[in-house]
Amino acid sequence: MSQTSSDKPITGLPENARRPLGPGEKYVPVVSAETGVPEVTARSVTMGLIFCAIFSMAAAYLALKVGQGIEAAIPISILTIGLSRFFSRRNTLLENVIVQSIGANSSHVVAGAVFTIPALYMLAAEAGSGVTQPSVWQVIVVSFLGGCLGILFLIPLRYHLMVEMHGQFPWPEGTATTEILVSGERVGSQAKILALSAIVGAAYDGVVTTFHGMAERITFSATGLGKLLTGQFMTFRLLNNAALVGIGYIIGLKYSAIIAAGSFLSYFVLVPMVHAIGAHLPEVLPPGAKLISAMSPDEVFRSYVKIIGVGGIAGAGIMGVASSVPSMVRSIVANLKGLKSQDRRAKAEVPRVDRSLSGSFVAVGLVIFAFAALLFFSFGIGLKDSLMPAFVGTALVMAIAFLFAPVAARAIAIIGTNPVSGMTMLTLIVTGFVMLRLGLSGGTGMFVTMMVGGVVCTALAASGALSSDLKIGFWLGATPARQLGLKFVGTAVAATFCGLAMWVMAQADPSQGFGTNAIPAPQASAMKEILVGIFGATTAPLQWYLFGLGVLLSLLLRMVGVPALAFALGMYLPIELNTSVLLGGILSWVVARSKVGEGPEITKPRMDRGVLIASGLMAGGAIMGVVDAVINAAIKMSTGAMEAKSVVHVLSDAAFEGALGDWLAMAGLCGLCAFLVLYARRAKAED
């Protein structure tokens, strides 16, 4: 058992961990402010860095090979707890937080790199593009600079997001990771509930994705009058995924309904409307690549409607930054006041769990970043003869990351998904047009634009991931300053190993390189098309019109009191993801619903057990996702069959995608929902 201030067993998070605090109420973490519990030790730092290096290479390989990355926080937490048993002294809870926090750098650094940099390798392989292949050190520097910038911009927001907004956001991934870390300290029924639920989640998602025992996506199509009115453009889809149901449960009905409403507007209103009008056009309407009349609903969504969602996210982000400015100013002013004080005793009185990095650290860090980025853009990528693009590139990186870092953090807090690809696309569009105005064109313009996009993409991924790590630390009692300081170390390790893995993969024969069937790199392929569109002068004015509609929509939502970011996220994400999240939110309402005469002493244990079960489903689904990705990649390498997904398929491809797969999936999903609801409602007050 780990040390705590009272040496009592840890039974779970405090009662007020996930709700708003009342007047005068204060949240006390699991490990209280001053306990002497080991936190940053040689063991915790070493384990964290080893996990960071391993998962960085694995995540880079899998994301480029099969288009599926690794969310490292949950697997690392489980591995940390398991390996702790082999030491003479088991890890403390705070040591496990540090291990997870360092190791989780692998996910966001890899996400930033694989979404962008492979596009340059693809362009370099094309004759006449004028793009040179990036070197390994350029990839490492881009990833490291972006990761550091994301950390620096989130530091002033820590108090606002963690303390002032306590209980306002569901933090789905942070909740699941926290429950896993706490379960390593618990004995009895709660740990068993989490373990059983994780097994159920892993088994369920394994049957779906790995063994094709039931459909992965359930589709309901309109019939009768509905089909007459809408044709093929009115379909309701649901992803058959236990982890997503768990996320929706933790998010709750309010936010999941808002997110789903965004999807319903996109798929049930805008997509049919665009198709109905565009079907009469005799020519291709950019940014679409073919006639609208020949497009499927998903193609209409990706080509036109999704851009409105990106604009909505951008508009919500700008308003979010504006609303966060007062809190950021208060935080900076308080830090500056602390610098002027020479009373060391007063500084020492700040509780350990409230000690963060100072405003002066952020200011100095941003100056160092600006200088390093300017040097990199000037000399690292060949702009030394024209310093203006280097200055502008540095300014764009800092301005866009400043605007969107809070967006990434809030998106993770609300739904556990970071819309980093949409914000990166916007970055590439803005930067591309600016670079064209500065006289950069062709290969040089594309290279510089993608380098700027790579830094921004990594910064936004880092901000989102860091917010979740800080919330985990806030709940459990980690020292924020130590978490933040070690994040820079973890970023350096993740950038190095991700860069090395990407460089090694880029040395393959051109027929087996990035953008081929061997290494599809789907996200980077989309970024490449944006670059070609901008510097090939084919970008359509319609893109900006649709983007502007999204910004206007976010403003209207703000005016009527609807959370604009949650709604815009729903518009941006595929409907099947959000309907599964909505299902989880409905289940949380069912579990929390009380009968006549039932008070909080009855409903509270049900809700607590429900969160445990949902966290287990998320954890099991995440682990199975990693296993499935590894199996998928191994089969692709050994057989060359790009569609192979597992060793054994229970259903044929026709049955898997047809009515039989759908009926089995509906039966399985009903069983999963029954498990969650009935098991949660069995909870008693003594539990």
Image (cartoon, rainbow, N blue to C red):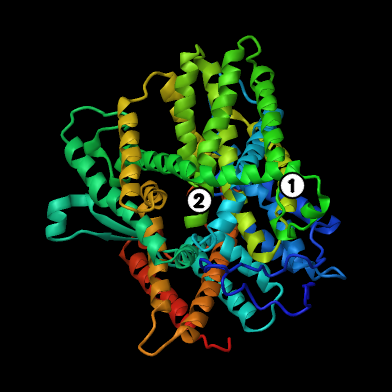
Residue nearest the viewer, comparing 585 with 619: 585
- Residue 472: x and y, percent? 63, 60
Q: Is residue 290 left or right of residue 601?
A: left
Q: Residue at x 79, y 60 (%)?
A: 39
Residue 128 in sight in this render? no
**Residue identifier under label 1:** 485
Q: Residue at x 82, y 63 (%)?
A: 38
- Could you tell me which quadrant the N terminus lies in? bottom right
Q: Residue at x 38, y 47 (%)?
A: 568
**Residue identifier under label 2:** 410
- Badge 1 density bin: few <14, some 14–19, many ≥20, Cα 10 Å: some
Q: Amino acid at mark 2?
A: Arg
Q: Is residue 543 left or right of residue 675?
A: left
- Residue 86: x and y, percent? 82, 69
Q: Amino acid at mark 1?
A: Gly
Residue 102 in sight in this render? yes
- Residue 14: x and y, percent? 61, 73
Residue nearest the viewer, comparing 7 with 217: 7
Q: Is residue 196 left or right of residue 643?
A: right
- Mark 1–mark 2 distance (CA, rounded to whole Å): 22 Å
Tag shown at residue 426: none
Residue nearest the viewer, comparing 402 with 671: 402
State the SS at label 2: helix
